[in-house]
Amino acid sequence: MTEDVYNPLDKLNLARSIEFELLTREPGPLSSVDHIPGAGVYVIYYSGSLPIYAPIAEGNKGGTFSRPIYVGKAIPKGGRKGGLRRDFSPTGNALASRLRQHAASIDEAINLNLADFSLRHLVVDDIWIPLGENMLIETFQPTWNRAIDGFGNKDPGRRRANQYKSPWDVLHPGRRFADKLGDGGMTTEFLEQRVADYLAGRPLARLPKVIADQQDEETKETEESADEA
């Protein structure tokens, strides 16, 4: 019988090493992120009392923090342009800036409380940041990454006239920029059922076509963008 040769530099093993290292980090409050340096990956946990997220909160009780609601990354400015250069991840404020944006989104939402959110983060050499994020999403399948899109959205600015509210903004209204966006045909009840179905492992109802198309376009723009995440 032959045995597979372990390669520590295999892409999957590298991704797992990022995940393992992040999960050794002590969770901290999302309300206090200004001290965080550099760029990297992070997971956000919810432990509040909103009924639709009860299974998620249950996984984070008593300081266990085993079920993220969202996974994200913060890439240093110019980090998507490629090329060989010095590693900028340990410096700068990409992580702190991105996490402040998330904290502001939650703070503006009328049915969420920032005190109910915690995070783990890991400063990562920028070339490995997307790999780490992908691994964490595959492992945890977070609700705000997989079922309720839009938490990480920024103000669309000039494109606002052609944009619709994201599922996240319909389910958690309050973000000032989202108040000016169009109605894409989703109801709160539809999205609450979508969360319930997702957490129960049931098939998800399709989003309205205009929303699905918008999400595809946003994903494409994110991948092509060279700006700081």
Image (cartoon, helix red, strand yellow):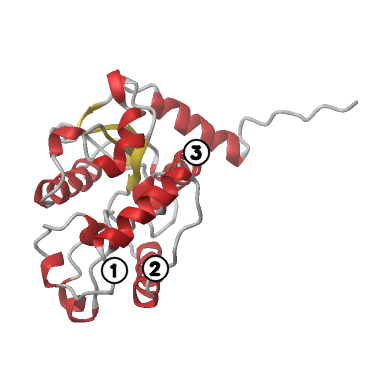
* Residue 144 image point, x, y percent: 34, 50
Residues at circles 2 and 1 in contact by the CB criterion of under 8 Å: yes
Outermost residue, right direction? 1
Depth check: give the residue in front, 163 or 202.
202
Does residue 196 sit above or below 120 in this rendering? Answer: below
* Residue 140 image point, x, y percent: 45, 39
- To which quarter of the image does residue 78 belong? bottom left
For the residues labelled 1 and 3, the Cα–Cα distance comes to: 28 Å
**Amino acid on which disc 1 is placed:** Met
Left or right: 21 in relation to 54: right
* Residue 99 image point, x, y percent: 21, 43
Depth check: give the residue in front, 120 or 78.
120
Depth check: give the residue in front, 197 or 148.
197
**Amino acid on which disc 3 is placed:** Thr
The number of callouts visible is: 3
Q: Please name the residue that numbered disc 2 is placed on.
A: 207
Q: Please name the residue that numbered disc 1 is placed on.
A: 186
Does residue 132 sit above or below 178 in this rendering? Answer: above
Residues at circles 1 and 3 in contact by the CB criterion of under 8 Å: no
Left or right: 27 in relation to 29: right
Dot 3: element? helix
Binning the other alpha carbons within 10 Å of mark 1 as few (below 14), some (14 to 19) or many (20 upward) gives some
Mark 2 or mark 1: name the one nearer the start of the chain.
1
Depth check: give the residue in front, 71 or 61.
61
Left or right: 100 in relation to 152: left
